[in-house]
Image (cartoon, rainbow, N blue to C red):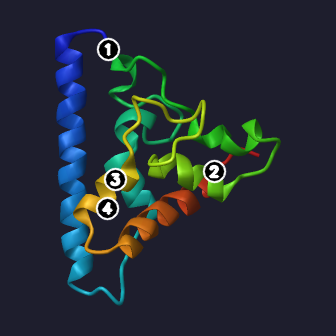
Amino acid sequence: MKSFAARAAVAGALITLVAATTDGAAQNSQNPSQPQLSGSLLFTNYCATCHGQRATGDGPLAAHLRKQPANLTLLARRNGGVFSPEMVARIIDGRKPLAGHGGGDMPAWGDAFAKSAENSENTAGKINALVRYLETLQQK
């Protein structure tokens, strides 16, 4: 991080994101048989701050991080043209880190989602919705 102000901005953004997670869980608990999980909305709420609205790594907090956020539109290209839902889900989850992926700057969304969710299905549902959305963003 570059300065105390930058660290404070990142911390504030993460607190806001975790709070938003709690709000989303409350909405889904009103009708647990019909969870409406939009990957696009989840991305906007949890990922765009660092990765940017177009998922290219240019979010408003990107310049304040030690490591540039990944361009998420290139995941398949960087993996030999194959989009791996399992690998992407594991990176988003963050509780079983992959060497060279995510890292200390990226939140472990599995923990954040689990702490605010009523059950693990909600956590898995959010991660899966994000994975499906990221798959639609892949450059050809």
Comes first in the chain, label 3 or label 1 = 1
Q: Position of residue 109 (x, y in %)?
A: 38, 50
Callouts 3 and 1 close, C-beta under 8 Å: no
The circle on residue 111 is 3
Comes first in the chain, label 2 or label 3 = 2
Comes first in the chain, label 4 or label 1 = 1
Residue under label 4, please give it.
Answer: 114
Kind of residue sitting beneath label 1? Met
Callouts 4 and 3 close, C-beta under 8 Å: yes
Q: Position of residue 8 (x, y in %)?
A: 17, 23
Kindly identify the residue that appears in the image at 36 percent across and 80 percent down: 35
Quadrant hosting residue 47: top left
Relative to 85, residue 139 above or below: above
Kindly identify the residue that appears in the image at 39 percent across and 29 percent down: 105
Callouts 2 and 3 close, C-beta under 8 Å: no
Give SS at disc 3: helix
Give SS at disc 2: helix
Assess disc 4: are there few (<14), some (14-19) or many (≥20) residues with their C-alpha within 10 Å of its C-alpha: some
Q: Is residue 45 left or right of residue 66?
A: left
Residue furthest top in the image: 2
Give the Cα distance between marks 2 and 4. Answer: 19 Å
Give the Cα distance between marks 2 and 3. Answer: 17 Å
Q: Position of residue 63 (x, y in %)?
A: 38, 18
Residue under label 2, please give it.
Answer: 87
Residue under label 1, please give it.
Answer: 1
